[in-house]
Structure formats: structure tokens, C-alpha cells
């Protein structure tokens, strides 16, 4: 698993990337009440906003850590946005994309480097 | 204490009001209106008059209000709302006139509006006032539309408004409403605009700078003269958010400080009641060079006769369907007349006195990030309580247990764990002393028994509410369950 | 010193000592001398409550009121009956001297009232959700247009010139400043021309805005307008008179996506135009595009029912320049006013208000039709407002006013084609004899 400076995580499985927000980010946001998801088939562009996460007290943009086409969105979040708080790196994932440029993965931070920026 | 919903008090067949008997020959609506446009069903509860009166009376008792106790909510100027003003706004000659009556039949109303314009122009040092905007935020939008019209008329397609990072949320939101881009300007370590950052952002495409002075920290920016010169040097205009006008009335005027456009909040400085969130009134004042852009109709006076004037090619148009929140304006004028020039100046003097007194007394127990004289309000930070795991929110909630309203919290955004207090001039020293004692007590509790704060309030009609579920599964309409 | 300031001389001295200054002036020291107002304000000195009351009372008496005259003026503000209990409740300090309910534990009264208001407005309009109120009718439409634009990602808006001209002006000023293409279509026999709508609508159209009943009192075919809008992927916004909705089908049941309107008819005093109240209700899909405050029901730590401001992340204090609207203060007390009105009236009472207004307006039309030289230009269905044409409207209105009758709004100023036309509004408050007098004096005035 790798991380972006904007607090997203990515798991790369073949050419599919699973994307969510980090434990740290979920904690900072507080009680998450709504996740605005992209449509299936839409294109994500690295470092561009692709959705928003709304908590009781704030809203935060979600940035794409990699470029690619959305092949699946986590519909569960519609009914149960709290999943992002409860299990941000598991059941609280946000989208799966088919990556266009796997090399982008190498530009992302490893766990130690990400931890350092959260301090 | 839970009050049933209106809908739970419904008893079919009860009536709370009876109309006079229908005294004209009747027709069958179905003969005159196509049936698809006739209503099939209307859900609405039926209650007797007494049941209705009791329901709302009981609900009213679940509120904190200025009439019940101290309400030091910063940036909101919760001063006393004089009772007599309510009587005056309800005089038949003010309450029972129709906006489409012709000018001859409403000379008193027009004279009242014109007089209010004149007094507000004098107070702000501006050349002309419109009373149309319905609240502060609408005043901001109106002022920004005027700024835009000014630049457009000169053929300057400017794009940006500068706003300090301590600015109120309506400021940037109003910029978006008129199509301006927002550039945030940093504050310096005295809480004022960072001149270096301002200079770095001054450019020909800057349409204006939008600030409060004193700012949302309650601090007067003494560099205002320099700021004005800088902004004017690129033909930018200076906008004054008058939410904090209660600090300077009769002492200095936005017009004299170099501002081109001002809005006031009559529901703050001029004592008109907040009504649980509104109505307000947000008059806008401008310097002579912007007069032609004011919304229409304008009220004009000739030989003691008042009329409306609509003809004006440069006007931004209209921002409200009527002349403004008239009865709010009536109350504000009553306040101005009662207070008079001395009373208005005193109001600011004593508002500033009260705020400095409170700040000085609280400084021993709480962290004051900007340690200098404040104006009508001041900000302290709850960050020193973090050791006990106590937050500003907990202090705010604990205050409710002592019968006080909380300060404004987590605003301005540039102060960590901010608490913003605005005592206003209508509070006595005794009230302030009792409140300060409670603040000190709470600081002690935070160390000795932090759970008291974290579980507060306990003596209010309800305890802390589950806001997360409220937002996740919104129940906002009785007739449609989530 | 004004009595609203309680400090005694001794207290002032003690406070100055604590602060460590000699005079209040020192607290203003940072204001540079050259920016000080070093003179008295040019405003009269303060006066006693009695003197102030006398002065303002005499000013108020220069106005002709709808109590001493008979009011047939409408155009968005109506002279309806207002039950006496309302004002007594509004004058409870616990309601009117409270601020926005930011601390819900001590604002349950205000919050529950707003929840009840929201529910009643939804019921009346046939919509899923609404907010805690907007400023008034015109700006409610401005906000509705912005919602439709945000939802569809389109900029163009089509409206009809049967919409209140005052609302259209505000839309032009505010929506126009946001690069909205505003297309205004004409009318045929008092109602919107649907063929023109079909021609004008396209895939750039965010919304079609229609008034129901329209400015002339006529009942628009909102069902077909909504159909045309939806076929083009646009939303249908219906600006409705809330009283009429007790008689007329709810716009929500006829295809509207957003219902807006002016809430003044629901028991709010005329007060020369304000404060009134704008309502805006919408279908569920538009929830996160709603402007302004929204109250939701929830539970407290003990599981007790309670209310909070909710979905606040939409609003300016959180989203700042990205917020959909800048509204902060709204018209809360006026929302309460309309809530108490609806509670007192109930469904039956409200239907009666609508029905009596309708009956009296139809009686009046039949009486007016008997007058020579009076024509009724539109034949369409109407609710409680109608247009008549007389020789020399201005002089007729003046003569009628001399008889103590505010006889209507001259339309030529807003519709140059409708020279000598007058818009008349008839509420349940008008009596048969007032209507008969109107017709009698009108007959004399046009002789
Ligand atoms: C500094 C400031 N500006 C603007 C506003 C907006 O005023 P209104 O609520 O009347 O729209 C407020 C209100 O809280 C404020 O405190």
C-alpha cells in the first residue's frame, strides 16, 4: 500500500488500483456523513479532485493519487458513510480504477514517508 | 422535558381559528379550474387555539435568549432589544401598509426610510445608502455587485477580491455569488493584515479588499490608511463589513478610513432582534463615485414630498423584491432616535469597555493569543486545556449549565480552539463579574474534573445531540421519514 | 447616557482601574488621530421613550393604511386575515431575542419550530425537503436557479414574463451576475406560451421557471411545462402562492423539481414589503444543493428526541467561497410566524382561506363583467387575482383611492402592452359589500 500527500492510500493489484482515504485523514475529518462518489466509467486524473467527503463539521476534497478509469465505486458508502471512519483502508474504500500509468505508483509515498508528513 | 410535535397534537375536527361567513354567491371550483389542478389531499394538523398557544409557549421556554440571560456570542452583538421598538414597528401606519400603495399614500414611510438613510450615511461617513439588502450577507453581495459595476463601466475586467484569513465565511461566499475569485491574505502576529502579503498580492486585476475593522479578532487595524492607499493604487475598492460596527460608532467612520463601500447589520449594531436567526437588514453605503450603481428604486425628496425614482442606467438592478425589511428598519431608526448622537457613541464606548474588562479578567486563567487592547470583542484560545483532553467545545457546553450562552467558537479560523466573546454595552458589571467567576470555575473544573466538561451540559432541556446520525440519515420533514 | 447602558459612575471607575487606563478614550488609542471623528455626529440628541414614540407615531399617521382603506392590492403581498394569537407568541422574548440556534441544547424551541415549519412547507408544496427559510420570494427563485445550475451543470434559464416583474428584476441582477443566460418568453391569454417554450428549450437549459398562479392570477399548466423541461434534461421550478396550494394541486404532484415562493400570505403583516419570507422546497435528489440552514431531528446522549442544524457542510461558514449560497441570517421569526398561522388554521382553515378568496374573486369578476367599459382581457382559469382593463387606469385608481379603495396595481409600467390594465387581488378578508362598493365606484369613475 502506498500513500499520497493528500492523504489517500492506493493498493495496486495488477492494473487495478483500489483507492481510499487514510486512517489519519478519516480521524481528522471526524464523523463522516457523506461521500460524493464519481460515476463508473469516469476518468480520474492524477492530483485532480474526483470527489468530496463531508463530515459533520467540514468538507474535504478527495484527490486522485493515480490516473485511470473508474471500474467500480463503493456503493455501500451511500447508505453507510461511517464505514470510512470504521475501516478506512478496508471496507471504507472509495473507488477502484483501471490505471493508465502504473509508473505513477512509484511516485507515491511509502508508509514511513507518509507517517512523517502526518507528524 | 420533550414537547410533542405539532403533528402529534393533531385531532381531526378541531379548529384554531374561524373565518367570517362566506357572504358571496358561490361557484363550483371544478367548473372553473381543470380538475388536475385541484388539490386532492392536504396534510396539516388540527389544533385548538389554546393548544397552539401552549405548544409554542412551551417551546419558547426551551430557548436561551437575551431576555433570559447573558449572550456573549462574538460577532453577533447580542445587545438588548428595546421593547418599545416592537410597539413602534407594529403601529398600524407602519405594519398595515402595502408595498404597491402609491407614493402619496405612504409619505410617512418614505420619509422614515430617507431619514434612516441620512443617519446611516452620517454614522458611516458615506455619501449614499440603500436600505434594500435583507441581511449582512446580502449587503455584501450588493456591495460587491456595485464594485463590479464600477470596474465594468470603466472597462476594467477585474477578477479578484482580497480577503484576510480571519474573514467571515459570508465574505468569500459573496464573492463567488458575483463571480469574483477570492485571494486570502495572511494575518500578522498582531492579528492584523500582513502588509507584506497584501503587497505581494496587489495587482491590476484586484477589484477590491474586503475587511472588517476592527477585525473578527476584535482588533483595530491601525494600518488601515496604508491598506487603503495600496488598494486604491491599482484602482481597487475598499469594502467594509460592518458586522463589527458596534466597536466604533461615533469614534471613527469607514468613510474617513478610506472605505468606498460599507454594509451594516441593523440586527447587530442597531438593536433589532435576531428572531432566532432572522430577519435582519443589511444596508449598504457608498461614496459619491459609486452612487449611480446603487439598487433602485431610490427614494427622492423634493419640497418635502417623497417619491420613488427608477430611472438609472447604471444601477446594478434590484437585490430584493421590495424596498427592504421595512419593519426592521423602523426599529433601527427608533433606536437611533432614542440613543441620539451621544448615546450611539457611548454604546461603542461601553461595548469596548466591557470587552476589555472581561478580557483583562480572563487573562489570568485563559490564553489570550493577541495581548493588546481589543475593541468590542476578543478571542481567547482553549488550547491550554488540551492536557486534560478538554476542548473549547466542552467549555462552551459547560457554560450552558450555568445559564449562559456560549461564545462563538472555532471562529475566526486562524486561532486554534477559538472562543470569541462579545459582551455588548448593555450588560452591567455585575453580569460580567458573575460570568467571569463561572469561566474561572470552569477552568478549575477542567483540571480537577474534566469529565464534568466533557459531559456537559446536563441541566439543559436536552444533552449533547447526535449530529452525525442527523446528517447521515437526515430526518428533516415529519411527513417523510428517512 | 442612554438607559440601555447600565453602568454607574462608580462601576465605570472600577472597570477602568482593572483594565489599567484612566479613560475609555485610551482604549481607542490605536485609531490614528487623523481618522478619528473629532466632532459630534450630525444626528439629534437622544430623547425619552415618550418623545420618540410620539415622533414616530406621527410619522406613521402620514401613511394611509389597509385598515382605514380597502385593499385590493396584491402582486405578491396580500391583505389576509391574521389571527391575533400569532403576534402574542412572536413577542415572547425567548423567541425573538435569541440568535441562530448554534447551541442546540439551549435552542430546542427555535429548532423544533423550524422542523415543524419545514414539514408544513413540504406538505403544502408536495416536496421532500426544504430549508429554514430564505429572505423573500424573489431571492428564493434566485437560489432555486443556482441549485438547478449546480445540479445540471448547465447555465441557461428559461422563464416567462408572467412571473412577478419584481422577481424577474432580482433574478436578472443576481443570477445575471453569474453568467446566467436568461431567456424570457411571452404569454398568450394570460398564461405562458408552451410552443415558445418547446422552441427555446435545449440541452443547455438548466431550468424552466414558472409562477403558479402567475402574476396575473392565472393558473399555468405546470404539468406540461414540467414535462417539456424534463424531456430536455432541465429542472422545473414552480414559484407558488402558498395559500393557493390549499385549493390547487401541489406542484410536487405535477412534476415540479423545486417549489419556491413568497410566504407572506401565511399570516405575515404587510409592513410595506418586509420582512417577508422566501420558501424553497425540493425533491430528494437536490438535498446537497439546498442553500441555507436545515434542521434535523435526532437523539441526545440519553436517547431523548432533539433537533440540530444539520448538513452544515453545504454552508458558507464551512465551505466559504465554494458554498452554493452566501446566506447566513435568514427570516427565522417570520418562518415561526407562518408556522403558527398554519397551526391555527389547520388543513380545514387553510382550505377555507383559499376557497373564500377564490369565491370572492369569482364573484367580483362576475360583477365587474356587468360594467360597461370594463373588459377582462384574459379568459383563463384564475385563483384570487384578475386583470381588468378600464379607460384611463391611472385616473381611475386615483379616484378610487379618494373613495378609500386601493383598487389595484396599474400594469403598464411592467407590461407596456397592458396599457390601462389593473391587477386586482381579492382575499377572504374582503366582504361582499366592499366588493360591491368597488364595482359601484368603478362604474362612477369610468363614466
Ligand atoms: C463578520 C460578519 N460578517 C458578515 C456576517 C453576515 O451577516 P448576516 O448574518 O446578517 O447575513 C456576519 C454574521 O454573523 C458576521 O459576523
Image (spheres, coloured by chain):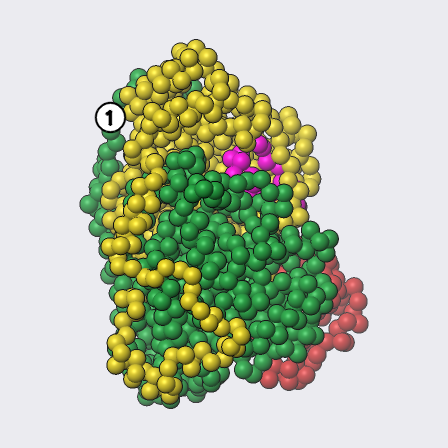
Chain colours: A red, B green, C yellow
* Most foreground residue, B117 or C433: B117
Q: Residue at x 42, y 25 (%)?
A: C397
Which is more toward the observer, B34 or B281?
B281
Tell me the residue at 50%/54% (across/down). B129
Q: Position of residue C419 (x, y in %)?
A: 54, 23
Q: Position of residue A53 (x, y in %)?
A: 57, 64
Most foreground residue, B457 or A112: B457
Residue A64 sits in quarter? bottom right
| Residue B429 visible to the viewer | yes
User: Please, is residue B317 above or below residue C72 in the view?
Assistant: below
Q: How many marks?
A: 1
Asked whether residue C342 is drawn in magenta, I would say: no
Q: Where are the magenta residues, as a range?
A: C154-172
Q: Is residue A77 left or right of residue B379?
A: right
* Residue C301 horizontal/vertical position (percent): 34, 68
Disc 1 designates what residue? B21
| Lateral position of residue B187 relative to residue B360, left or right | right
* Displayed quadrant of residue C278: top left
Q: Classify the position of the N terminus of chain C by image quarter.
A: bottom left
Residue C359 visible to an observer of this rendering: no
Picture coordinates of residue B187, whole percent (x, y): 58, 77
Say whether residue C158 is magenta. Answer: yes
Please tell me which residue is depicted at 42% across the width and 64% down the height of the picture.
Answer: C41
Residue closest to the far front = B303
- Classify residue C274 as left or right of residue B317: left
Identify the subunit bearing mark 1: B
Residue at the location (46% across, 53% down)?
Answer: B117
Amino acid at each position: 500500500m502506498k500513500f499520497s500527500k493528500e492523504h489517500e492510500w492506493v493498493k495496486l493489484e495488477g492494473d487495478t488500483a483500489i483507492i481510499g482515504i487514510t486512517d489519519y485523514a478519516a480521524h481528522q475529518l471526524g464523523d463522516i456523513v457523506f461521500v460524493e462518489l464519481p460515476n463508473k466509467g469516469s476518468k480520474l486524473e492524477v492530483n485532480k479532485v474526483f470527489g468530496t467527503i463531508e463530515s459533520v463539521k467540514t468538507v474535504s476534497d478527495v484527490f486522485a493519487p493515480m490516473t485511470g478509469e473508474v471500474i467500480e465505486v463503493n456503493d455501500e458508502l451511500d447508505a453507510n458513510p461511517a464505514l470510512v471512519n470504521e475501516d478506512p483502508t478496508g471496507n471504507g474504500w472509495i473507488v477502484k480504477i483501471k490505471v493508465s500509468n502504473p509508473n505513477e505508483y512509484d511516485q507515491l509515498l511509502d508508509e514511513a514517508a507518509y507517517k512523517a508528513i502526518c507528524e | 422535558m420533550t414537547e410533542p410535535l405539532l403533528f402529534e397534537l393533531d385531532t381531526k375536527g378541531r379548529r384554531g381559528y374561524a373565518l367570517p361567513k362566506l357572504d358571496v354567491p358561490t361557484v363550483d371550483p371544478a367548473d372553473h379550474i381543470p380538475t388536475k389542478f385541484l388539490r386532492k389531499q392536504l396534510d396539516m394538523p388540527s389544533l385548538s387555539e389554546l393548544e397552539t398557544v401552549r405548544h409554542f409557549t412551551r417551546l419558547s421556554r426551551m430557548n436561551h435568549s437575551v431576555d433570559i440571560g447573558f449572550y456573549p456570542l462574538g460577532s453577533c452583538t447580542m445587545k438588548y432589544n428595546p421593547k418599545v421598538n416592537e410597539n413602534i414597528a407594529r403601529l398600524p401606519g407602519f405594519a398595515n401598509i402595502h408595498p404597491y400603495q402609491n407614493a402619496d399614500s405612504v409619505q410617512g414611510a418614505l420619509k422614515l426610510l430617507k431619514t434612516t438613510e441620512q443617519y446611516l450615511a452620517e454614522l458611516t461617513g458615506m455619501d449614499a445608502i440603500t436600505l434594500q439588502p435583507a441581511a449582512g450577507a446580502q449587503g455584501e453581495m450588493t456591495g460587491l455587485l456595485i464594485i463590479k459595476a464600477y470596474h465594468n463601466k470603466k472597462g476594467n475586467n477585474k477578477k479578484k477580491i482580497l480577503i484576510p484569513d480571519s474573514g467571515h465565511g459570508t465574505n468569500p461566499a459573496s464573492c463567488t455569488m458575483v463571480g469574483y475569485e477570492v485571494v486570502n491574505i495572511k494575518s500578522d502576529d498582531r492579528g492584523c493584515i500582513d502588509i507584506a502579503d497584501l503587497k505581494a498580492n496587489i495587482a491590476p486585476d484586484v477589484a477590491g479588499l474586503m475587511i472588517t475593522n476592527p477585525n473578527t479578532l476584535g482588533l483595530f487595524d491601525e494600518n488601515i490608511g496604508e491598506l487603503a492607499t495600496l488598494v486604491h493604487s491599482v484602482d481597487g475598492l475598499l469594502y467594509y463589513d460592518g458586522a463589527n460596527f458596534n466597536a466604533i460608532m461615533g469614534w471613527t467612520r469607514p468613510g474617513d478610513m478610506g472605505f468606498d463601500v460599507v454594509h451594516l447589520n441593523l440586527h447587530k449594531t442597531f438593536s433589532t432582534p435576531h428572531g432566532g436567526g432572522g430577519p435582519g437588514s443589511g444596508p449598504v453605503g457608498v461614496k459619491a463615485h459609486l452612487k449611480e450603481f446603487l439598487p433602485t428604486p431610490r427614494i427622492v425628496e423634493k419640497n418635502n414630498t417623497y417619491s420613488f425614482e427608477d430611472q438609472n442606467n447604471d444601477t446594478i438592478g434590484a437585490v430584493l423584491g421590495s424596498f427592504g425589511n421595512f419593519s426592521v428598519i423602523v426599529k433601527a431608526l427608533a433606536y437611533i432616535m432614542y440613543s441620539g448622537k451621544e448615546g450611539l457613541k457611548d454604546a461603542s464606548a461601553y461595548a469596548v469597555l466591557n470587552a476589555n474588562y472581561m478580557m483583562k479578567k480572563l487573562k489570568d486563567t485563559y490564553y489570550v493569543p493577541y495581548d493588546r487592547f481589543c475593541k468590542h470583542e476578543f478571542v481567547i484560545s482553549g488550547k491550554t486545556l488540551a492536557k486534560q483532553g478538554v476542548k473549547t467545545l466542552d467549555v462552551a457546553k459547560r457554560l450552558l449549565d450555568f445559564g449562559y450562552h456560549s461564545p462563538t467558537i472555532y471562529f475566526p479560523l486562524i486561532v486554534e480552539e477559538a472562543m470569541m466573546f462579545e459582551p455588548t454595552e448593555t450588560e452591567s458589571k455585575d453580569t460580567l463579574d458573575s460570568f467571569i467567576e463561572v469561566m474561572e470555575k470552569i477552568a478549575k473544573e477542567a483540571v480537577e474534573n474534566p469529565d464534568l466538561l466533557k459531559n456537559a451540559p446536563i441541566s439543559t432541556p436536552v444533552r449533547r445531540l447526535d449530529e452525525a446520525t442527523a446528517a447521515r440519515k437526515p430526518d428533516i420533514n415529519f411527513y417523510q421519514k428517512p | 447616557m442612554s438607559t440601555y447602558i447600565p453602568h454607574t459612575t462608580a462601576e465605570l471607575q472600577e472597570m477602568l482601574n482593572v483594565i489599567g487606563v484612566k479613560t475609555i478614550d485610551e482604549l481607542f488609542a490605536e485609531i490614528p488621530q487623523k481618522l478619528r471623528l473629532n466632532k459630534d455626529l450630525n444626528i439629534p440628541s437622544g430623547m425619552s421613550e415618550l418623545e420618540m414614540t410620539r415622533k414616530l407615531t406621527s410619522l406613521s399617521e402620514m401613511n394611509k393604511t389597509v385598515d382605514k382603506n380597502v385593499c385590493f392590492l396584491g402582486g405578491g403581498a396580500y391583505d389576509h386575515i391574521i389571527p391575533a394569537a400569532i403576534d402574542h407568541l412572536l413577542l415572547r422574548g425567548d423567541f425573538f431575542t435569541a440568535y441562530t440556534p448554534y447551541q442546540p441544547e439551549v435552542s430546542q424551541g427555535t429548532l423544533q419550530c423550524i422542523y415543524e415549519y419545514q414539514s408544513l412547507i413540504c406538505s403544502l408544496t408536495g416536496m421532500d425537503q426544504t430549508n429554514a427559510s430564505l429572505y423573500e420570494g424573489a431571492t428564493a427563485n434566485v437560489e432555486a436557479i443556482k441549485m438547478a445550475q449546480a445540479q445540471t451543470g448547465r447555465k441557461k434559464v428559461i422563464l416567462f414574463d408572467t412571473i412577478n416583474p419584481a422577481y424577474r428584476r432580482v433574478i436578472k441582477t443576481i443570477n445575471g451576475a453569474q453568467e446566467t443566460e436568461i431567456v424570457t418568453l411571452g404569454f398568450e391569454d394570460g398564461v405562458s406560451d408552451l410552443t415558445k417554450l418547446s422552441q427555446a428549450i435545449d440541452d443547455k437549459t438548466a431550468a424552466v421557471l414558472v409562477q403558479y398562479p402567475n402574476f396575473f392570477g392565472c393558473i399555468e399548466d405546470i404539468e406540461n411545462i414540467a414535462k417539456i423541461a424534463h424531456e430536455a434534461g432541465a429542472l422545473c421550478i414552480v414559484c407558488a402562492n402558498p395559500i393557493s396550494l390549499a385549493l390547487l394541486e401541489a406542484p410536487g404532484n405535477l412534476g415540479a423539481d423545486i417549489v419556491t415562493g413568497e410566504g407572506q400570505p401565511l399570516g405575515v403583516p404587510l409592513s410595506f414589503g418586509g420582512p417577508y419570507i422566501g420558501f424553497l422546497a425540493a425533491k430528494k435528489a437536490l438535498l446537497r444543493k439546498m442553500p441555507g440552514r436545515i434542521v434535523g431531528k435526532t437523539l441526545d446522549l440519553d436517547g431523548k428526541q432533539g433537533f440540530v442544524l444539520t448538513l452544515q457542510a453545504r454552508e458558507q461558514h464551512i465551505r466559504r467561497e465554494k458554498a452554493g449560497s452566501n446566506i447566513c441570517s435568514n427570516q427565522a421569526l417570520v418562518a415561526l410566524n407562518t408556522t403558527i398561522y398554519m397551526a391555527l388554521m389547520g388543513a380545514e382553515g387553510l382550505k377555507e382561506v383559499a376557497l373564500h378568496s377564490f369565491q370572492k374573486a369569482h364573484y367580483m369578476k362576475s360583477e365587474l363583467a356587468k360594467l360597461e367599459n370594463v373588459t377582462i382581457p384574459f379568459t383563463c382559469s384564475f385563483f384570487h387575482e384578475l386583470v381588468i382593463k378600464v379607460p384611463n387606469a391611472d385616473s381611475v385608481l386615483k379616484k378610487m383611492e379618494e373613495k378609500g379603495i386601493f383598487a389595484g396595481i396599474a400594469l403598464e409600467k411592467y407590461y407596456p402592452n397592458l396599457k390601462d390594465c389593473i391587477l386586482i387581488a381579492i382575499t377572504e378578508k374582503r366582504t361582499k359589500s366592499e366588493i360591491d362598493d368597488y364595482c359601484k365606484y368603478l362604474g362612477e369613475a369610468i363614466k
